[in-house]
Structures are given as structure tokens and as C-alpha cells.
Amino acid sequence: MKRRLSFLLLVLIGLAVWSYRMFNPGDRHLYLNFDSGHGHGYLYYEDGLWTRYLPLERQYEVTLYYADLSPDGSKIAFKKDSFLYIHNLHSNALVRLNAEPNYPSDNTSVQWSLDGSRIGFACSLTYEAPIEVCSWDVIKGEMQILSDLQAYGKYDALYFGGWSADAKTIAFIILYPEDRSGNRLQRILRLDTDTGTVSTVLDSQQAGLDVDRNIALSPDGRTILFSANTLLEEQAKDYLYALYQINSDGSGLRRLVDLDRWSLFLPVWSPDGRSFYVNAAGDYGLIPHGYFHMIPRRYDLSGRLTSIPISQLGRIMLSWRSAE
């Protein structure tokens, strides 16, 4: 009798949780589970109620490193064979956007503007041409090169770091090749889309940091999150990154979240800019051996850990969109 009552109680609790989530759906998230052994990235979409696998890598024979969920939660943008694509989650349709290939190839970030009208990414019309900040106008069906970075010399890579809500500010990072002494330089830059003016937010060598390629501009355009370690930490070859914050005018640099035996990378802002997720990698005895030790962790603006979605163990958060 007690077992039946316990089972009935569990069923009722499960129904209550299901009913609550059904009528009070949460925010939507896009996750990536990257299998380094097979070289595949597997996408998972969480709509506040369920998490489901999206077989894009099998459907389109693409190795996914980056993808982004549209603000309305209906589409996913990604690159394949140097072309930009949109996959519709409702119709399962795939649309190739640009008529000509653009470079660099697929291992680069793409991000929707917060109103869903544009997609930002790095592009170059030829292998020899400089990599620039580019935008695809979803409504007009046109690509536009937004930057002119000739003054910044010869760099190897550019990663898009996000739009402000009014689309007037874009953050991105450029990575330079190692010099003869083995030193590396990264520059976080800010682009004013009205004037085309590009300003340096952070020079990694001047700041004494080694900066990761993934950065995130806040929705209000005022601050940037990025992963980095100090030069002493880099020399120790631990390859662990802490989370840093800097204002988009270059002021207020601070170490926001320390290592805590995890390496932190690829920060993702909440839609309202009041909190953020950052992906954490490592185990260090915290998780039973045998798992791929990676999980998103949520923080408030002070850098205080507020929650960990255990159900997403082993996955990397790529996008966070509002349920509204």
C-alpha cells in the first residue's frame, strides 16, 4: 500500500511539473554537443518544455562548430562550405542565403541581430582579401561588408561577438599569428554601424592577457564578456580561462568569475541583459569519471553563480532567447 501511495505521489508531482511547464514555458536555448572523436557537432533545442535533438549534421553533412537561434526561436543560422544557411525549425526547410561563397569557412561564429532582421558573421570575398565584419539582411536578401580593417594589419581570424539591441554597436575580436618569440596578440574591437568607425576596446598584450576567441556584447551595448588568462597562467600551460568583463569604451576591465577548477568560455547573455551563462569545461574530481566534463553555468551581474542546468551536462550553450 505504501509503495502504491509513493508511486501515485511521484506521478502527481510529475504531472504538476509537466502542467506548470506546459502553461508556463521558459526561455529557449540552443546547445551544442561536440564529439571531438568523430568531428561532429550535435545540436539540441530546448523550448522551455522539452529538449530535442536536431540532426542538422546528418541532414546537411555539416560539421557544426557554431550556430545561432533566431530571436523568435523559429530558425537556426549556421555556415556550411563557406555559405550561410538558415534552417527553419517548423517547416524543416533549409535556405542558402548568399549566392557566392565567402571566407573564412565554417569554423566561425554567426549571430542574429536582436530584432531578427540581420545576421552578423565574418567574411572575405576571396582567400587573399582581409576578413571583415559582415551582415546579411534577412528582409532584403543582401550582404553588406560593415568594416574596413586595413589599419589593423595582418590578422589570422575574426570572430563576431554580438549586436546591441539597437544594432548600432557590434563587438568582435581579431586574432593575430604568433610572433617569433611565441607571443600572441588579440584585439577586442567595437564597430559603430552608423559611421563605420572601429575602436579598440582591449589590446591583449597591453592588458597582459591571452584572450579566447569567443566574446559577448551585452544587449545594451555597454559591456563585453570574454574568457582569458594571464600570461603567467598561459606559461603554466594549464589552458584554463577565467571570465573577464570590460566596458565597450575600454574602461573598467575586471576579472569577473575566477577559475574555480573549471575553464570558462563562450559567454551567453540573457535576453534582458540581467544575467548570463558561461560554459565551463573540466572535471577535477567534481563529476564521476567517464563523462565529458562540460556544462553551462548561470551567473548574475556581480559574478555570483546562481544555477547549473544539470540536465544539459556535456553540452555547450550557444543561444539564449526569450519565451515571449
Image (cartoon, rainbow, N blue to C red):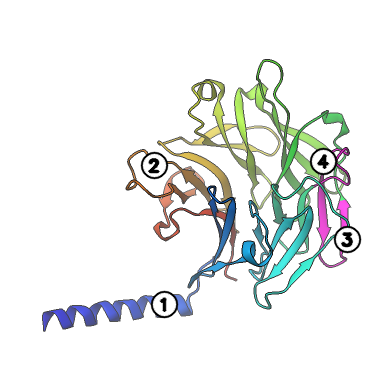
Q: Nearer the viewer, mark 1 or mark 2?
A: 2
Residue 84 in the image: state x and y as whole percent.
77, 58
Residue bearing mark 3: 99
Q: Secondary structure at mark 4?
A: loop
Q: Secondary structure at mark 3?
A: loop
Residue bearing mark 2: 283
94 vs 138, nearest the viewer = 94
Residue bearing mark 4: 131
- Earlier sequence position, callout 1 versus callout 2: 1
Residue 114 in the image: state x and y as whole percent.
70, 60
Residue 165 in view, yes or no = no
Q: Quadrant of residue 57?
A: bottom right
- The Cα atoms of the two marked residues, 3 and 1, are separated by 46 Å
- The Cα atoms of the two marked residues, 2 and 3, are separated by 44 Å
Q: Please provide the residue range marked out in magenta.
A: 123-144
Task: Give amino acid for label 3.
Answer: Ala
Q: Is residue 141 magenta?
A: yes
Farthest-out residue, top: 181
- Earlier sequence position, callout 4 versus callout 1: 1
- Are the residues tagged 4 and 1 within 8 Å (C-beta)? no
Residue 195 in the image: state x and y as whole percent.
88, 44
- Earlier sequence position, callout 3 versus callout 1: 1
Residue bearing mark 1: 20
Task: Give amino acid for label 4.
Answer: Ile
- Earlier sequence position, callout 2 versus callout 4: 4
Q: Quadrant of residue 18?
A: bottom left
- The Cα atoms of the two marked residues, 1 and 2, are separated by 33 Å
- The Cα atoms of the two marked residues, 4 and 3, are separated by 18 Å
Task: Give amino acid for label 2.
Answer: Asp
Q: Secondary structure at mark 2?
A: loop
- Earlier sequence position, callout 2 versus callout 3: 3
